[in-house]
Amino acid sequence: NAGVTQTPKFQVLKTGQSMTLQCAQDMNHNSMYWYRQDPGMGLRLIYYSASEGTTDKGEVPNGYNVSRLNKREFSLRLESAAPSQTSVYFCASSEEGGVFDEQFFGPGTRLTVL
Amino acid sequence: ILNVEQSPQSLHVQEGDSTNFTCSFPSSNFYALHWYRWETAKSPEALFVMTLNGDEKKKGRISATLNTKEGYSYLYIKGSQPEDSATYLCAFMDSNYQLIWGAGTKLIIKP
């Protein structure tokens, strides 16, 4: 039982390049999330998916797109990377996204945009 | 914009001492308050989910209290041990059932 996995762990991009961050969970969770974590700030929600086939914007969606490929997988795409997108990205999942549901996190992807 | 504040930002505590830190959140439209523990080089892991005013939760030497009327929660650690060194995050659940996260309190236990 791997929990939540993310690839890659590290990535360096040049401004304007594109890339997709992959996330998968094996806990049969309905809800999945993408966060970014910047120094001195709390985790900020980029996009979430309450269930397979649905996605919604979070607090900071600009510059990102997501795909909920199936129940297990939720990918985050940067179409044209900018230095402001340098951050650590975390994927998380929860059973239903309800009040009592804890979120389970992946190991993170450290992205640097030059 | 909802704001979740944690204080202090960082804390050095002698091994064996007890400590506590604070999470402040909006006192209106309260749904839940989550506490997570985040060890270096690992991912955040849930400690507590608190929903009722006056709620107290305990897990080993760690406990938390909740005051929804005034918008704060305290996390207590009794008899700190080196393995307690971590960043402790709180998160307020908003009306969309999304978590608004504080920046965390980094706890360092000195042996």
Image: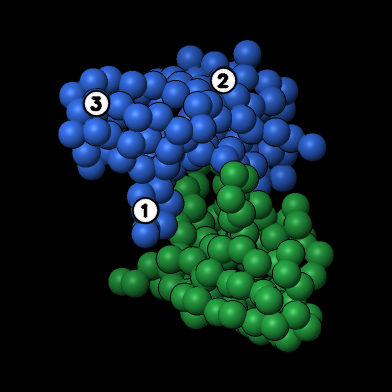
Amino acid of disc 2: Tyr
Residue A79 visible in the displayed image? no
Graded by Cα atoms within 10 Å as few (under 14), some (14 to 19) or many (20 or more), the crowding at tag 1 reads few
10 Å neighbourhood of mark 3: few (<14), some, or many (≥20)? some
**Secondary structure found at label 3:** strand
Identify the residue shown where x is 20% and y is 28%.
B15
Q: Are marks 1 and 3 on the same chain?
A: yes
Image mark 3: chain? B
Marks 3, 2: nearer the viewer? 3
Q: Residue beneath label 3, please?
A: B14
Compute the Cα span from label 3 to label 2.
25 Å
Residue B40 numbered tag: 1
Subunit under mark 2: B
Residue under the image location 33 percent in, 36 percent down:
B108
**The colour assigned to chain A within the rendered structure:** green
- The number of numbered badges drawn on the structure is 3
Mark 2 secondary-structure assignment: strand
When asked about the image quadrant of residue B2, the answer is top right
Q: Are marks 3 and 2 on the same chain?
A: yes
Instruction: Please determine whether, in this image, residue A104 is positioned above or below residue B108.
Output: below
N-term-proximal mark, 3 vs 2: 3
Q: Position of residue B97 (x, y in %)?
A: 65, 45
Q: Residues within 10 Å of mark 2 (few under 14, many from 20)?
A: some
Residue B72: give its label. 2
